[in-house]
Amino acid sequence: MPEKAALGEGPTWDPAAERLIWVDILGSRIHTFAPATGRRSVMVTEQHVGAAKPRAGGGLVVNLRDGIGLYGADGAFGWLRRDPVPGRRGNDAVVAADGSLWAGTMRYDETPGGGSLTRVASDGSATEVFGSVAVSNGTGWSPDGSLMYYVDSPTRRIDVCRMGGGIPLDRRPLVTLEPGEGFPDGLSVDADGCVWVALWDGGQVRRYTPDGALDRTVELPVRRPTACAFGGPGLRDLYITTARTGLTAPHPLSGSLLVVPGAGQGLPGTAFGG
């Protein structure tokens, strides 16, 4: 879908509305696409928006430059947790099985240690999960919830943690990319427990098994895929967001939302708030 986003990110399937939600971070826009009807919508936000996820009961939770905001089903906006830090913005985020938002941040200049991953509950209370990261990106859990996967992009790693008491423990590298392969960005875990990850500057989405073995590679015409998620009927289609920013001669599809029909079997998501 040739939307031409500057920095497309965060594809998320909204089962209640049967639509895909994704954002253009630097364009301050939230996009939706309903594959059954072809209907699209665009909503402009007042700040750069790193992620937008469905809320229980309707509306969206958004990871903005200055914190976490809420849109009601009627479009009314309010802050859930406002925490502005000069030079920092929200980045990728994911809703956990308990309905909490795990929201990443980063410095605009990608200073190492300038970002974090924070768990935000529906009442606005927050707990830092990981501090001192550079570019907090893809986060996901195994089908049984026992493992968590996490990407701090400049490390070139996909890390894996054991979950205990609702927090990630024993963080260790699962996959490390070689220079020239690109940087891991957003990720999605499928029903088999395999990790699909978009490779920024790598022009690919890769599927890794739970033991870190490369299982499948999806070659893309664009250089900067940013994230991937399953959606559509039966959660079998893989949607991929892409970026144009920083490219002197971007491919015509750079910045578009791409889809690989029948790529696999996704996992049902959870709305923010449970």
Image (cartoon, rainbow, N blue to C red):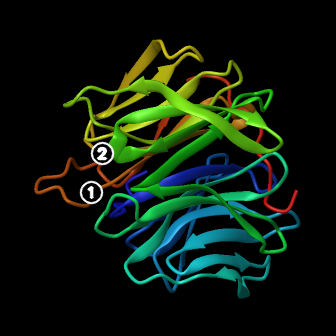
Looking at the image, the residue that sits furthest to the front is 170
Residue 1 lies, in percent from the top left, at 43, 51
Q: How many marks?
A: 2
- The reply, left or right, for residue 254 in relation to residue 70 is left
Between 237 and 46, the one lying in front of the other is: 46
Between 240 and 210, the one lying in front of the other is: 210
Q: CA distance from mark 2 to mark 1?
A: 7 Å
Q: Residue at 67% across / 37% down in the picture?
A: 169
Residue 26 figure quarter: bottom left
| For residue 172, above or below residue 94 | above
Residue 131 lies, in percent from the top left, at 53, 58
Q: Residue at 68% across / 30% down in the picture?
A: 266
Q: Of marks 2 and 1, which one's residue comes earlier in the chain?
A: 2
Residue 27 lies, in percent from the top left, at 39, 73
Mark 1 is surrounded, within 10 Å at the Cα level, by few (under 14), some (14 to 19) or many (20 or more) other residues, namely many
- The reply, left or right, for residue 99 in relation to residue 242 is right
Q: Secondary structure at mark 1?
A: loop
Q: Secondary structure at mark 2?
A: loop
The residue type indicated by label 1 comes to Arg
Q: Which residue is mark 1?
A: 244
The residue type indicated by label 2 comes to Arg
Q: Residue at 42% across / 57% down in the picture?
A: 8
- The reply, left or right, for residue 114 in relation to residue 229 is left
Q: Which residue is mark 2?
A: 224
Q: Residue at 56% across / 14% down in the picture?
A: 211
Residue 261 seen by the camera: no
Q: Pointer 2 and pointer 1: residues touching (CB < 8 Å)?
A: yes
Residue 34 lies, in percent from the top left, at 64, 53
Mark 2 is surrounded, within 10 Å at the Cα level, by few (under 14), some (14 to 19) or many (20 or more) other residues, namely many
- Location of the C terminus (image quadrant): bottom right
